Image: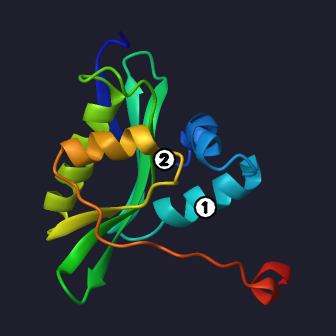
Amino acid sequence: MFGKLEAVPVTLETASQVFPLARSLVPELELDGWLAFARRQIERPETAGIVGVRDERGYFHGLFNYEVRHDVRTGPILDVGMAMAVNLLDRAGAGAVLVRAIDAMAVALGCAGTQIRLTAEQRQLRRWLEGEGHALRCVVLEKAIAAAITN
């Protein structure tokens, strides 16, 4: 459908190309905010970054950001804070490449496992991940702190 898809590191040069995908998850996200976030992820040591799923024409069909953190229960874990793929109905498409890339990154970085954060609306991706062996382990509660927002 999309031709050959591959997982590639997102660079400072390609960060603006994946912005529409990030904005589909965070509609209020502005380009400047995304580029600042991308710069922080990309310029960190090798234990963090952004990966995009790109076709042979250079168009992106998925992305995830990651960082290694240490979990007291499991040891090093690949924490995926944002993940999305278009056309999850294609079992050989962006979703499959995304899942394989997350697993490969965890192995490459010596992680004992992965944790992937999804929005409540990402039901289709959640079903896909569960079909690949991922399971619900915890619930994340979120609260905005006014003092941090105004600074």
In the image, residue 93 lies at what x, y percent?
31, 23
Location of residue 93 with respect to 22 vertically, above or below: above
Query: Looking at the image, can residue 9 be seen?
Result: no
Q: Which mark is residue 109?
A: none
In the image, residue 120 lies at what x, y percent?
52, 53
Query: Looking at the image, can residue 126 be seen?
Result: yes
Where is residue 38, by image quadrant? bottom right
Distance (Cα) linking label 1 and label 2: 12 Å
Residue that appears at 75% across and 53% down: 32
Q: Amino acid at mark 2?
A: Thr
Compare marks 1 and 2 and give the one earlier in the sequence.
2
Q: Is residue 22 left or right of residue 74?
A: right
Crowd around label 1: few <14 · some 14–19 · many ≥20 (10 Å): few
- In the picture of the structure, the residue carrying the numbered disc 1 is 37
Q: Amino acid at mark 1?
A: Phe
- In the picture of the structure, the residue carrying the numbered disc 2 is 11
Secondary element at image label 2: loop
In the image, residue 96 lies at what x, y percent?
25, 33
Q: Is residue 19 left or right of residue 64?
A: right
Where is residue 39, by image quadrant? bottom right
Residue closer to the observer: 99 or 60: 99
Location of residue 8 with respect to 48 vertically, above or below: above
Quadrant housing the C terminus = bottom right
Secondary element at image label 1: helix
Location of residue 79 with respect to 120 vertically, above or below: below
Front: mark 1 or 2: 1
Where is residue 33, by image quadrant? bottom right
Quadrant housing the N terminus = top left
Residue furthest right in the image: 150
Residue that appears at 45% across and 69% down: 44
Residue that appears at 46% across and 22% down: 58
In the image, residue 91 lies at what x, y percent?
25, 24
